[in-house]
Amino acid sequence: MQHVALADRPDELHDPQTFITKYVWSQDHKVIAIQYGSTAIFVGLIALVLSGLMRLQLGFPDTFDFIDPNSYLQFVTMHGMIMVIYLLTALLLGGFGNYLIPLMCGARDMVFPFMNMLSYWVYLLSVIILLASFFVPGGPTGAGWTLYPPQAILDGTPGYDWGIILMLVSLAVFIVAFTMGGLNYVTTVLQARTHGMTLMRMPLSVWGIFVATILGILAFPALLVSAIMMLLDKTLHTSFFMPAVVSLGENLSYEGGSPILFQHLFWFFGHPEVYIVALPAFGMVSDVLSVHARKNIFGYRMMVWAIVIIGALSFVVWAHHMYVSGMHPAFGFFFATTTLIIAVPTAIKVYNWVLTLWRGNIHLTVPMLFAIGFIFTFTHGGLTGLFLGNVTIDLPLSDTYFVVAHFHMVMGVSPIMVLFAAIYHWFPLMTGKMFDERLGKWHFWCTFLGTYAIYLPMHYLGFLGVPRRYFAMGTTDFIPESAQSLNAGITVAALLVGLSQLIFLYNIFKTLRSGEKSPRNPWGAASLEWQTADVPPHHGNWGKELPQVHRWAYDYSVPGAAEDFIPQNHPVTEDEQTEGH
Amino acid sequence: MSIETDKNATYTEPGVAGVVSDWAADKQAFDMPWGKLMMWIFLLSDTFIFSVFLTSYMTVRISATDAWPNASEVFALEIAGVHLPLLLIAIMTFILITSSGTMAMAVNCAYRGDKKKAVTFIVLTALFGASFVGMQAFEWTKLITEEGIRPWGNPLGAAQFGSSFFMITGFHGLHVTGGVIYLLWVARRVSTGYYDGKGLEIVEIAGLYWHFVDLVWVFIFAFFYLW
């Protein structure tokens, strides 16, 4: 039996009339996507400024009076948490997930638009709660983004009083928002695709976002529960995570809790979180590479299965973040094995991206530059992951700048590269205008070369044993003087990269104000989102009739075809040599 | 499963490949309304929440340094001089499971088109749920005032006993309370004719949630009260 989605019912797809229903309390997935995206970019800029402040302290210690050890730790914490949760997760899933899923699947909207709208507003609430912690007594929490107890809630850690409470509440609220959005994304992909859009014809972007959302729906519960328990430990003095502690010479009332339990719960969320960020990036970069190389993605089925397998494996590797926590060595063996197995599907993906480029007709457009940049940064970050996945190599490198460099390359810079690729790629669709190509290229080269200038030296600092999260090195025998000059160099590079993001913002605002009108399908993309009745698509996306899909999303440079791409909604002709994709 | 299969696609592959392409069919992967699937996925997520709660409870039960109180004695009632361990919990469990029965009747009536009976059974289910929450309130009051158990401390032994108890039963109680409100809201909409012409799947969807809350209770009952 055919069940109709809410947004497919003509009588319930109200066309919003007033400014408020159109742009503020909007239930249109495209508007919600842009609300999500701009909020996420806004908090991301705050986190970028925080990282600049951290770098100032590290590069030039004893120079800036307004950074003391406490505020330094607060910058570290807020930078990490904002970037991972409130920027990357929100922008990739709330932003691009919302925008692309209905358009790429051929739906008129998400299946439950009202809840989709709520999702954004609850997300905004969580952001406000988070930012409020900058203005409460004691400031935001300085416990590190991992928020490990007992220190996170004890006197001596900055923000142990108000800051940590607001952080935990904000996380819980964020999870509620994510769940409302995530249920929509998964259900829309499963139940609301248009005619002919089989799962194995979906663009890889949708596959990545789909699997990442499932990961989120299953992983965020662990964070929610640990946030609740830590809140109880903090406010009601329960002892879930708190052993008997003597703090500042005082016997506290805590007794018998398990701090390691928190680490397990946190990383049971935290590791899938890495893939919640990475999988949408994997998917979108595949589409960008394929379009701009005018070639079908290499090994589509393999790419889909790699996404699914990586997603499944990501739930059984969490304790590789805890090799130094005193776990039983047998666990270390198990988790090192599963961790290294993940390298197999991941390597398949990297090979397939490179093979997609191989003998393609590569157009070095701005999105393509960022996509190729991603292959570099991701490969480098992934290779250092092999070092850290092994227990014996991880032990000396744990908590050094090697770790910082590794995860910034693999889940900081890499998803950001894809996000820029995606923003430049879909910008003409979202706004109908074409950005300034020259400024975009400046933005790319500053960002790409700049990030290497930041993170390559950090690997070396890590090998020297420079510990992370330290406010200042002081006089430490095993760290040579030269490490400090290297740190100063990293800071200069970091500030330049930070400033070069202004080029991006300027480009966006300039284009929105006075940009040239973009052609309908400037990149010649075959996937469904470019085949709407209007560009940018209007409310309801498809005019009167839903599109009929006849082929996969990667028919580029098909021999004998009139153009070098065939849109997904074009019927298969008699003499076409396809193999039933 | 699929309604309008594409003429050019072949779905006749044998073995694993065939299973994959069946699931990959266009329009709908599952033959059900989207709301029902969405509820299933939500419940999957909620399952993880309760699993983490129960796993954490087991962990702190092991890590606790003080002795764990004997649950069947803590939750015993003294009626007319007779000592009855776990009496109240047995009644609460019985009521909740009964409410699952009335919920199933409501779903049956809804699909047979008997709106009046469906509404009656939904309201009855909600009443059972409300009485469960009421008894829970009684249990909490007894524990707090008579036994002196608090989330942060416990005269009978490990502090984690009280913390886990209030946290887990509290979270479950919130689920039941939310369910009661949800059921009453559905009953109202069914009786005012909001779903006329759209089908009464909503009763089954609400029922899924209700059965889930019951099922979770069975696990809490087994792991917390019986162990």
Image (spheres, coloured by chain):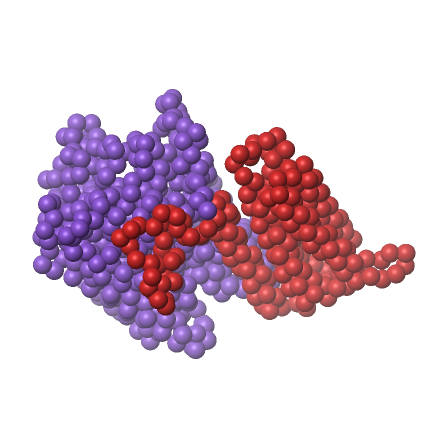
| Residue A79 horizontal/vertical position (percent) | 34, 48
Left or right: A520, with A17 as reference point: left
| Residue A70 horizontal/vertical position (percent) | 39, 50
Q: Nearer the viewer, residue A548 or B143?
A: A548
Q: Nearer the viewer, residue A464 or B153?
A: B153
| Residue B90 horizontal/vertical position (percent) | 75, 58
Instruction: State the residue lying farthest toward the right.
Output: B80
Q: Say which chain is red.
A: B
Left or right: A123, with A87 as reference point: right
Q: Nearer the viewer, residue A515 or B64?
A: A515
When asked about the image quadrant of residue A479, the answer is bottom left
Left or right: A135, with A466 as reference point: right
* Residue at image coords 38%, 27%: A15
Count the numbered circles shown.
0
Q: Is residue A528 above or below residue A472?
A: above
* Residue at image coords 28%, 46%: A549
Q: Say which chain is purple.
A: A
Q: Quick check: can you spot residue A281?
A: no
